[in-house]
Image (cartoon, grey):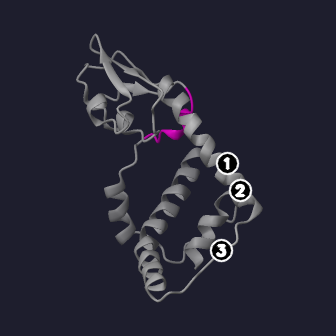
Amino acid sequence: MNDRKREVKTVTLNLQLLNVIPLKVTQAITEILSGKIHHTKPRVLDYFFAFIGKAEHFGAKIFGLSIHASKECTQCGLCARKCPANNIKIHDGVPKFGSNCMWCLKCIYDCPHQALSPGVFKFSVLKDGYNLREMSEKAKTQLDPKYQPSGSMLWQGVIDYLKN
């Protein structure tokens, strides 16, 4: 599958998740207030993905340390001001990245000159960025309710969540 098709599928799945979240929250609150106890049994694969999720924290440290500014950097300091992890310090006008990165990508997406790029895990940066407000608007108007994500083991938990 080419990158564009993969990105379209990911965006479609994200839109579907944005649409279902209010319903799921209301359902959970109703169940909690009624005293209903709902236990789910994790699948073996869930433990594997939980491990990968924990490994992401280590990957974020590596990712943060690998970010560098190109010659397009105007030394405005916006990246340092916007970083929720306080991971970016300005030294001699140049941003320096530490190991406290949360992998939120705010520095990369919010840079007005597109001067920041990672040295590793480049696949995690979407070419056109990720605008949650824009995604939410699309979710209200453009989602095909009949869309069914393709059944891959990686997405099975999300697919199950959307079906219930």
Contact, mark 2 vs mark 1 (Cβ under 8 Å): yes
In this view, 134 is above or below 25 = above
Contact, mark 3 vs mark 1 (Cβ under 8 Å): no
| Residue 27 on image: x %, y % | 46, 82
Q: How many marks?
A: 3
Quadrant of the rendered structure where residue 148 is? bottom right
The extreme right residue here reads 44
| Residue 61 on image: x %, y % | 52, 31
Question: What residue appears at the point 52 percent right and 24 percent down from the top-left corner?
Answer: 119
| Residue 4 on image: x %, y % | 54, 48
Mark drawn on residue 51 = 1
Q: Is residue 147 left or right of residue 128?
A: right
Question: What residue appears at the point 67 percent right and 48 percent down from the top-left corner?
Answer: 51
Alpha-carbon neighbours of circle 3 within 10 Å: few (<14), some, or many (≥20)?
few
Secondary structure of the residue carrying tag 2 is helix
Q: Which residue is mark 3?
A: 40
In this view, 106 is above or below 8 = above
Region rendered in magenta: 120-127
In this view, 108 is above or below 42 = above
Cα distance between the residues tagged 3 and 1 = 19 Å
Residue 61 seen in this snapshot = yes
Q: Amino acid at mark 1?
A: Phe
Secondary structure of the residue carrying tag 3 is loop
Q: Which residue is mark 2?
A: 47
Alpha-carbon neighbours of circle 1 within 10 Å: few (<14), some, or many (≥20)?
few
Question: What residue appears at the point 45 percent right and 31 percent down from the top-left corner?
Answer: 100
Confirm whether the magenta stretch covers residue 145: no
Q: Amino acid at mark 3?
A: Thr
Q: Is residue 28 left or right of residue 56?
A: left
Question: What residue appears at the point 41 percent right and 80 percent down from the top-left corner?
Answer: 26
